[in-house]
Amino acid sequence: MTYSSTRFCCNLVYTLFLFGVVTLRVANAKPATFLQDFHVTWSDSHIKQLDGGRAIQLILDQNSGCGFASKNKYLFGRVSMKIKLIPGDSAGTATAFYMNSDTNQIRDELDFEFLGNRSGQPYSVQTNVFAHGKGDREQRINLWFDPAADFHTYSILWNHQHVVFYVDEVPIRVYKNNEAKGIPFPKSQPMGVYSTLWEADDWATRGGLEKIDWNKAPFYAYYKDFDIEGCVIPGPATCASNPSNWWEGATYQHLDSVAAHRYRWVRMNHMVYDYCTDKRRNPVTPPECMAGI
């Protein structure tokens, strides 16, 4: 293989069953243990390794939340984790899984933020895209299943053409490369992979109206099947521009007809907020919304 990746295995073709539809691709990596690719960045006592390091438990209580980050940064590729979110009354909590260039004012960032809620209310997932320091591109959907009942897979695919956020291989957001129209796209800064669990009751649930019930603490979220495939930076100079990287292949340049159908279904039935249509925040429609996302 000519590209640099965190792990390799034999070219194993596996089958993904998505709503009864069979999709094939070649797998170049396998899920790692936590310490292979990550380290604790915040409150070591609140992250516990399970199953020999193949899974972890994140803990939030009145003393602290916690966080972890990848040991490397990557330029293009795919990152995926299986997460089981906080069950029951999770209002005021936020569980985040994201990529970040860690470059302050000009940072690039790709966010999944899972926003807790009162018991019986749907979990919301908020996505955001920062490109060349500009963010405020929030979109929010209500998940169509209970993400606290079992593990579900959350993935970010990032190539030269677009960024795609997936939930169980269903695309929920696409941010296209529209640099030709003067719209920033993250393509030059490598990003690390991060996750945090913290108190966010000033904004996370109903805009901060619902506060954390600390009588329900501690709160637990679980992660497993850590999978990163991408160009490690620093690494081979030609990796990020190599068109033979699987994530740059023709299959991943756009959504196929099945994925596009699933994408429209999510947007029509489960989207509850879109910055593109928020005229209070954006009286003038942002240019990337006009160009298509």
Image (tube, helix red, strand yellow):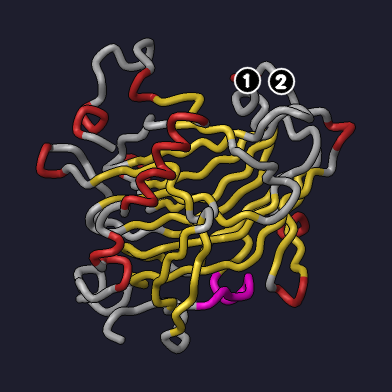
Residue stretch in magenta:
30-37
Q: Position of residue 12 (x, y in %)?
A: 46, 83
Question: The residue under label 2 is which amino acid type?
Answer: Glu
Locate the N terminus and report the quarter of the image it occupies: bottom left
Q: Residue at x 74, y 58 (%)?
A: 57
> Which numbered dot is residue 267?
none
Residue 55 shown in magenta: no
Residue 36 shown in magenta: yes
Q: Position of residue 51 (x, y in %)?
A: 77, 73
Question: The residue under label 1 is which amino acid type?
Answer: Arg
Report how many numbered discs are placed on residues in the image: 2
Q: Residues within 10 Å of mark 1 (few under 14, many from 20)?
A: some
Q: Residues within 10 Å of mark 2 (few under 14, many from 20)?
A: some
* Discs 1, 2 touching: Cβ within 8 Å: yes
Q: Residue furthest right?
A: 215
Name the residue that disc number 2 marks. 210
Q: Secondary structure at mark 2?
A: loop
Q: Residue at x 30, y 61 (%)?
A: 252
- Residue 194 in view of the camera: no
Q: Looking at the picture, does residue 141 appear above or below residue 283?
A: below
Q: Residue furthest left?
A: 180
Name the residue that disc number 1 marks. 206
State the image quarter where residue 179 is shown. top left
Q: Secondary structure at mark 1?
A: helix
State the image quarter where residue 32 is shown. bottom right
Q: Looking at the picture, does residue 160 appear above or below residue 50?
A: above
Q: CA distance from mark 1 to mark 2?
A: 6 Å
Q: Position of residue 30 (x, y in %)?
A: 53, 77
Q: Looking at the picture, does residue 93 appear above or below residue 277?
A: below
Q: Position of residue 249 (x, y in %)?
A: 26, 68
Q: Is residue 187 left or right of residue 139?
A: left
